[in-house]
Image (cartoon, rainbow, N blue to C red):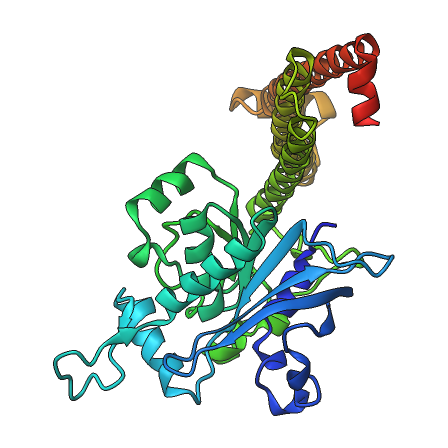
């Protein structure tokens, strides 16, 4: 069961943790209870409300249609800033801004030994406990604002996937190993940011997690309005809706690429489960089983690359098509204006005058459109190569399954 963007958003929502308007909801955020987030029912597996530094977190797993808790994927949600809590404010200043994992609760009057473990340290301890308890689960993280800062940090340090909102970038507290993993695994971290949100955009984008979206909210609001989690809107399938404006074209492509990465991770996890099944048979993994696993991993990688390629090329083709439409429109406008100015000239005389200054349909329309068309054909041809490769791998897998009856039964 794949967690949706809407579920991640609801799990990140600080209002459901603290807001008095939801006081009938908050008491149910206890271990063992069930709640609905983003339209999906979840069981709360573990919670923490750290009284020393204010860190709050919970781990949940979805419940399938049969009422069974599906711990193949566990989500850890970290709560954002409660501005009435001095511990959260201290974390924002000393950890998010200054990059200190230790917390000085009385910075105006420090004394030796007064520092305590900050929320960044407690967040990792909580993650370690969840990881130990659910060692066979795919663990992902989420959060909003300070919660996403912590969620990004934890995901990078543990090599997990993350989806969150309006989070400052945690590069100032990441280990070198985490930074290397981020560089080698682009697309694993997703931090949706409102373009106008000064709070959520703090710290740059050292993690590469940012998908910056223009929310078309105008410029009359205060700084906190742009930071609100409630600004994000989702479709009926729980996918974040990114406004289709000129600024957001890159964000739309980035989102499609992250979805492809999610599918890839899901397929690899299924293969890991299958590998454990083969090994549990007692005789280890046979040659055919190993070939099947290798081919399947290769297929997953190809299909992911193909999905990412299609996401990018769909955008590129759209740009090319818009370019073709634009030059044709410009040429028509030039002709219309020339006819208006030279209303005493014939059509051939108007065209001759335009040609004398290098303004011809061939130069402005036909040649650019031919160039655009060649580029479009090129990217389409590359897409066909991906399709062909995926087809070949699938055929080899099917041939292997037919050849090895026992393997086919295990996969059945």
Farthest residue to the front: give it.
Answer: 282
Q: Place residue 61 in its image quadrant.
A: bottom right
230 or 350, which lies in front?
230
Above-or-below relation of 54 to 389: below
Left or right: where 324 falls relative to 405: left
- Residue placed farthest to the right in the image? 66
| Most foreground residue, 247 or 210 | 210
Query: Residue most toward the left?
Result: 112
Would residue 213 be visible to someone looking at this image? no
Quadrant containing the C terminus is: top right
Observer-nearest of 227 and 279: 279
Q: Quadrant of residue 34?
A: bottom right
Task: Please give left or right for residue 53 compared with residue 33 in the image.
Answer: left
Q: Is residue 55 visible?
A: yes
Drawn side of residue 288 relative to residue 113, left or right: right
Q: Position of residue 108 (x, y in %)?
A: 18, 87
Q: Nearer the viewer, residue 402 or 366?
A: 402
Residue 410: x %, y % from top left: 79, 25
């Amino acid at each position: 069961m794949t967690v949706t963007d809407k579920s991640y958003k609801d799990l990140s929502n600080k209002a459901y943790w603290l807001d008095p308007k939801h006081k009938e909801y908050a008491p149910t955020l206890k271990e063992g209870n069930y709640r609905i987030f983003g339209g999906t029912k979840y069981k709360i597996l573990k919670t923490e409300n750290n009284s020393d530094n204010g860190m709050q977190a919970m781990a949940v797993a979805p419940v399938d249609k049969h009422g069974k808790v599906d711990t193949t994927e566990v989500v850890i949600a970290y709560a954002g800033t409660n501005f009435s809590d001095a511990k959260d404010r201290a974390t924002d200043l000393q950890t998010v801004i200054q990059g200190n994992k230790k917390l000085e609760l009385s910075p105006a009057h420090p004394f030796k030994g007064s520092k305590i473990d900050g929320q960044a340290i407690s967040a990792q301890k909580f993650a370690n406990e969840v990881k130990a308890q659910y060692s066979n689960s795919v663990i992902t993280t989420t959060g909003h604002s300070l919660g996403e800062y912590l969620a990004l940090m934890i995901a990078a340090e543990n090599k997990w996937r993350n989806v969150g909102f309006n989070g400052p970038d945690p590069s100032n507290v990441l280990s070198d190993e985490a930074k290397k993993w981020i560089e080698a695994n682009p697309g694993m971290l997703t931090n949706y940011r409102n373009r106008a949100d000064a709070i959520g955009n703090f710290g740059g984008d050292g993690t590469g997690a940012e998908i910056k979206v223009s929310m078309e909210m105008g410029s009359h609001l205060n700084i906190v309005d742009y930071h609100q989690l409630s600004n994000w809107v989702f479709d009926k399938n729980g996918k974040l809706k990114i406004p289709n404006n000129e600024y957001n074209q890159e964000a739309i492509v980035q989102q499609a690429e992250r979805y492809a990465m999610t599918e890839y991770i899901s397929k690899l996890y299924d293969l890991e489960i299958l590998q454990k099944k083969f090994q549990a048979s007692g005789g280890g993994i046979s040659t055919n089983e190993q070939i099947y696993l290798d081919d399947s991993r290769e297929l997953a990688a190809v299909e992911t690359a193909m999905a990412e390629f299609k996401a990018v090329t769909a955008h590129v083709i759209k740009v090319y098509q818009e370019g073709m439409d634009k030059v044709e429109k410009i040429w028509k406008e030039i002709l219309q204006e020339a006819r208006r100015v030279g209303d005493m000239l014939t059509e051939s005389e108007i065209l001759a005058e335009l040609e004398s200054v290098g303004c011809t349909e061939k130069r402005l329309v036909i040649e650019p459109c031919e160039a655009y068309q060649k580029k479009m054909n090129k990217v389409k041809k590359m897409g066909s190569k991906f399709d062909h490769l995926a087809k070949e791998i699938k055929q080899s897998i099917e041939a292997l399954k037919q050849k090895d009856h026992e393997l086919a039964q295990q996969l059945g």
